[in-house]
Amino acid sequence: MRMALGLSLLAASQAPPPAAQANAQALDSLSERYWQREVLNNFSLRLQMGVPVSQIRPITHANAQADAHFAQVILDDLRNVDTTRLDHGRWLTYRTLNYLATTDVATGKYFWLEQQATPYTGGSNIAAAQSIFTSFAFRSPSDAVRYTRLLHQYAAFIRSINDVLGEQHARGIILPNVETNAVAAMFKGYAQPTVSGALVPSASRLAVLAPIDRQTLRNDAAKITSSELVPAYAAVVAYLDGPYRLGAPSGVGLSEYPGGLAYYRYLVVQYTTLTITPEKLHAMGLEAVALLNRALATIQAEVGFRGTLAQFKHYLATDARFFVKTPEQYGDRLEMFAERSYAAAPRYFLHLPKAPFGVAPLPKALAGSQTFGYYNQGTPAQPKGFYLYNAWHPERTSALWAGALICHELIPGHHFQFSLQQEDSSLPNVRRYDLTETGFVEGWGEYSAQLCSDVGVLRTPYDRAGRIMQDLLSSTRLVVDTGMNAMGWSRPRAMKYMRDNLLFSESQIESESLRYSTDIPGQALAYKTGELTMLALRAHAQARLGKAFDIRKFHSWVIDSGAMTLDTLREHIDYEITASMSQ
C-alpha cells in the first residue's frame, strides 16, 4: 500500500505505463458496473440524484441474495486489480467499492436478522418512498402511467415488509413487545387519510395532462391508495397487534436471537469501519463518560452552581430557561446557531457548499419513535437540505444543546459534508453519492459539533455544557449499545445508566434504548469512534507539519474526497501530509 501512495505522488505529466492504464480501466469498469446496478435498484439514490424513479423494489430475501451474488462477483474481480499501480484517487475508489460490495454480501448473509419495519430503518425507507410521490414532477402524459405503476409497487413494498416480519417470526427473530408497540403506532400513522391522501396528486400539479386525464389519474391514485396501500399498512398493524407477539422475547438486544451475537460483532465493524470489538468499545465508552462528567463539573464551577454534579444535571434538565414554549421557537433557535456557524465557516474551510439549508418539523407520524429527528439532504427537485427536528413536545425537548445539535446536522456537519461531496463532479459516481460509511459520516457530524465548541460558535458556558451533554450521549451509546447487544445488559440497566449520565426525559430514554437494542443496533457506535479518529488525525497532522499546519487544508483533506472508511481515512491523511511536505 505504501508503494501505491508513493506512486501517486509522481508528477502528473508522467504518463502511466500501459499495464497501469489497463489496471485503472479495469477498476473504472468495475466501479461503473456496480454504480449502474445501484442506480437501477435504489429509489432513494435516484431521488437524491434527481433521476426519475422507475421502480420501488420490494424487500425480499431473493433480492438480497441477488445483490449479494452480484457483489461477490465484483469482489472476485477486484482481486485482479493491482492496487500498487493505482493513482491515489483510484485507490480511494478501490477501497470504497470493496467496502460497498463486502457490505452487500454480508446483507445477504444476515438478511433475516436485519429489522425492516422499525422506526429508524422502516421509518426512513417509508418516508423516502412517500417523497417519490409528493415530489413527483409530471412532465408528459406518460408520467401518469408511471405514477400509478409506482403506487402499485409502493403497496407491494409495504406488503413485503409484512412478509419479512412473518418469516423472521418463524425463525424466532421477534421484536420485544415494547418496540412492537412503537412500530404499530408508526404504521397506524401512515394509514391515516391525511397521510395516504397526500399521495393523490392535486389538479394543480397535473397541468401537463388533458383535463379528462387529470381526473382519471386522481381517481386511479385514490383507488390504489384506498384499496391497496392503506390495507397494506393496516395488515402490518393487524399482524403486529396480533399473532406476531406470540413468542416475543422478554429481553432486548441481538444476542436474544439465533446467530445474533455474530451479527452484532459484524455490525460493530460495519458501522464503525474500524477493526474493533464490542468489549473494547464498551471500555472506551466508560472512560469517555468519566472524562466528560469531569468536564461538566468544570462548567458547573464556572457558572457558580452550588451542589453536586447530579444536582447540576437535574438543573440543566429541568430549569425553564433551557426550554422553549413552541416547536417553532425551537426551530428558530436551531436556525440561529446554523447561521452563526455558517458565518464562522470561512475561517476553517477553504470552500463552502452551494446548497441552501434550513430546519423543519419532523413528520408527526415519527414523533413518538424518533428522539431527535434526522437530516434530509437536498435533491435537484428540492435543493435545500433540511434538519427535520422533533419538538412536538417542547416541554420535553431541551434547547440546551440546540447549537451542538445543529452543528452536527447542518453546518459544518452533515449538510456541509454531503453537499460538498455531491457538488464535486470530479468524483466518480460510486464515491460522489456514497454515504454509507457511518463511522465517517457520523464521526464528521460529532467532530463538527466539537469544532463549533472550540472555535466560539457555542459562546456561553451553557452552550458548551450542551455540547458536553451531546458528547456524553455519543459516549454513553458505546456503553449501552454494546451492553444490551453483546454483554448481557438488560434494558432497565441500560436505561438507568442513561438516566444517571444524560439529561433525557423518560420518553427519550425509552425511545433511544430501543433504537440501540432493537432498531439499528451498532449504528450509534459510529459517532464517538468517528469523532475520536478525526481528532486524533488532526493532532497527528499538526505534529508532523508543525507551523505549516493549516486547519482549512486539513478539513479539505478529510471531506473533499468523499466518505470513506476510517481505516482508509488514516492512510489518506498520511498521503496528504506527505504530499504537502513535498511541495
Image: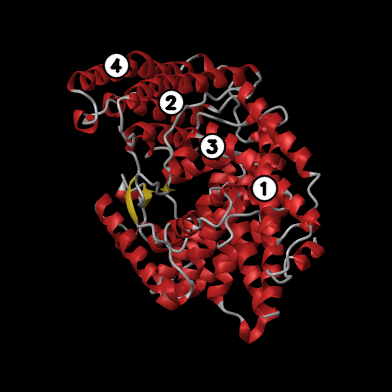
Seen at 37% across and 25% down, the residue is 188
Tag 1, which secondary structure?
A: helix
> In the rendered structure, which disc, 4 or 1, sits on the residue that comes first in sequence?
1
- The reply to whether callout 3 and callout 4 are in contact (CB within 8 Å) is no
* Residue at image location 58% in from the left, 22% down from the top: 60
Which picture quadrant has residue 138?
top left
Three-letter code for the amino acid on which mark 4 is drawn: Asp
Labels 3 and 2 touching (C-beta < 8 A): no
For label 3, the SS is: helix
In the figure, 550 relative to 525: above or below?
A: below
The mark found on residue 483 in the picture is none
**Of marks 1 and 3, the one in the foreground:** 1
Report how far apart the C-alphas of labels 3 and 4 lie in the structure.
28 Å
Q: Determine the CA span between mark 1 and mark 3.
A: 16 Å
Tell me, for residue 39, which label it has, or none: 3
Q: Is residue 86 left or right of residue 547?
A: right
Q: Give SS at disc 2.
A: helix
Amino acid beneath label 2: Ala
Q: Name the residue under label 1.
A: 28
Quadrant of residue 345 within the rendered picture: bottom left
